[in-house]
Image (cartoon, rainbow, N blue to C red):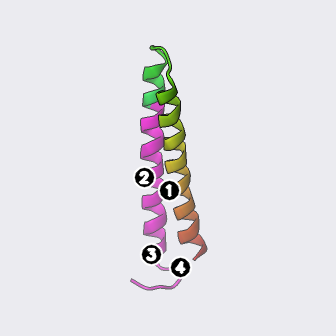
Amino acid sequence: MSSRPDSPCYYVQAFYGLVRAHGKLHRLIKFVGRIELFQKSEFDNEVIKETFDDIEGELDSVRQSIDN
């Protein structure tokens, strides 16, 4: 594929980055919905924080692919 910034390659990378972030957010929402029924623990908070960090990383990669 072309290395030009307006090439389809950049759009594909951005799209798949957004799809990965969406999937992680969807799993996080389901996880939080399940723990609402049970007693929350410190482990739950760590999982939520790690997932937010993963989502932020995916969105950062999308930003980088668009900026390049």
Q: Nearer the viewer, residue 48 or 3?
A: 48
Q: Real-space Cα distance between discs 2 and 4?
A: 22 Å
Q: Could you tell which of marks 2 and 4 lies nearer the N-terminus?
A: 4
Label 4 sits on what residue type? Asp
Q: Residue furthest right?
A: 67
The residue to which callout 2 is attached is: 20
> Where in the figure is residue 6, as x and y percent of width and height?
53, 79
> Where in the figure is residue 30, as x and y percent of width and height?
43, 29
Label 1 sits on what residue type? Glu
Give the quadrant of the C terminus.
Answer: bottom right
Q: Main secondary structure of the magenta part?
A: helix
The residue to which callout 3 is attached is: 8
Q: Real-space Cα distance between discs 4 and 1?
A: 20 Å
Q: Residues within 10 Å of mark 1 (few under 14, many from 20)?
A: many
Q: Which mark is residue 58?
A: 1
Q: Nearer the viewer, residue 49 or 17?
A: 49
Q: Residues within 10 Å of mark 3 (few under 14, many from 20)?
A: few
Q: Real-space Cα distance between discs 2 and 3?
A: 18 Å
Q: Residue at x 42, y 37 (%)?
A: 27
Which label lies toward us, 2 or 4?
Answer: 2
**Local SS, label 2:** helix
The residue to which callout 4 is attached is: 6
Q: Real-space Cα distance between discs 4 and 3?
A: 7 Å
1 shown above or below 31:
below
Q: Residues within 10 Å of mark 4 (few under 14, many from 20)?
A: few
In magenta, the rendered stretch is 1-29
Marks 2/3 in contact by CB < 8 Å: the verdict is no
Q: Nearer the viewer, residue 5 or 24?
A: 24
Q: Residues within 10 Å of mark 2 (few under 14, many from 20)?
A: some
Please tell me in which quadrant of the rendered image residue 63 appears. Answer: bottom right
